[in-house]
Image: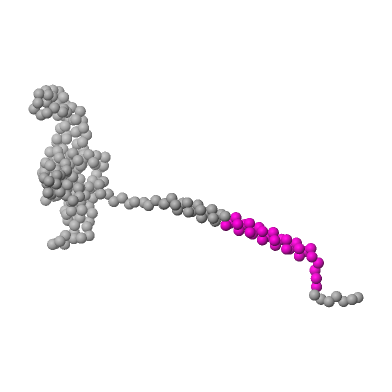
Amino acid sequence: MLRNLASSMFLTERETDPDLDSNIPQVKGRVITTLQKAKEVRSLVEKCITIARRSLQAQRQAEAFATDAEPHSDQWRKWRNSEQWQQWNQAIAPAVAARRRVLQMIGDKEAVRVLFEEIAPRFEERNGGYTRVLRLAKPRLGDAGTRAVLEFVGVHDRVKAVSERPAFETVADDESAAETAGEESADQTAGGEATASESDAMAEETSSPQTSDEPQTES
């Protein structure tokens, strides 16, 4: 059961023709199953990806000694009997052993091909954590089992967008700051004029003679 579930997850990444294959996944790199199955098969899927990812270097080294000739042609037979084939054979051996090991684990040749050709290069620079399990709120019909989504990371990642401050708000702030500065300068000017008028009034009161309401008596 776990081998079939892991193979199904790898096969969702293959290129399919709608005219030839009616079993097309709705979303690539994602399977929906129960929560317990998703947690159990996750370790198997990530182990297969790690084995495939470590064999990529051997495949690249073997490409330097490979040939583009058609199989069983005269040029291919010449390459097959040359020292270059011996070097290619030694370089490709770790990759072949990795494919055989993964085939024993999941038992599907098409899933192994998709894993080594399409999925493994995607996670070449990632050390573990290739999948994630997301619990679904709606249970499964029939037995009300808890469902979950098992998917590859890096494709359907949830990125939180940070809103940027619009430029017109900055212009409005500059205008309001300029208006505030203008009002403060106007208040300072008005305050200065009021202080000057008050000082002039005090000076006039000091220079004018004091008068009294009491009647003056003749001596």
How many numbered markers are drawn? 0
What segment is highlighted magenta in the picture? 183-212
On the image, the x and y values in percent for residue 43 come to 19, 48
From what the image shows, is residue 23 above or below residue 214? above
On the image, the x and y values in percent for residue 138 come to 20, 60
| Outermost residue to the right | 219
Residue ID at (18%, 30%): 62
Q: Is residue 47 magenta?
A: no
From what the image shows, is residue 213 above or below residue 108? below
Q: In the displayed structure, does residue 43 sit left or right of residue 188?
A: left
From what the image shows, is residue 71 above or below residue 207? above
Residue ID at (13%, 27%): 69
| Near-viewer residue (103 or 9) | 9
On the image, the x and y values in percent for residue 199 come to 71, 61
The C terminus: image quadrant: bottom right
On the image, the x and y values in percent for residue 194 come to 66, 61
Q: In the displayed structure, does residue 127 sit left or right of residue 203?
A: left
Residue 51 seen = no
Residue ID at (23%, 54%): 134
Name the colour scheme. one colour
Residue ID at (16%, 43%): 15
Residue 15 seen = yes
| Near-viewer residue (177 or 48) | 177
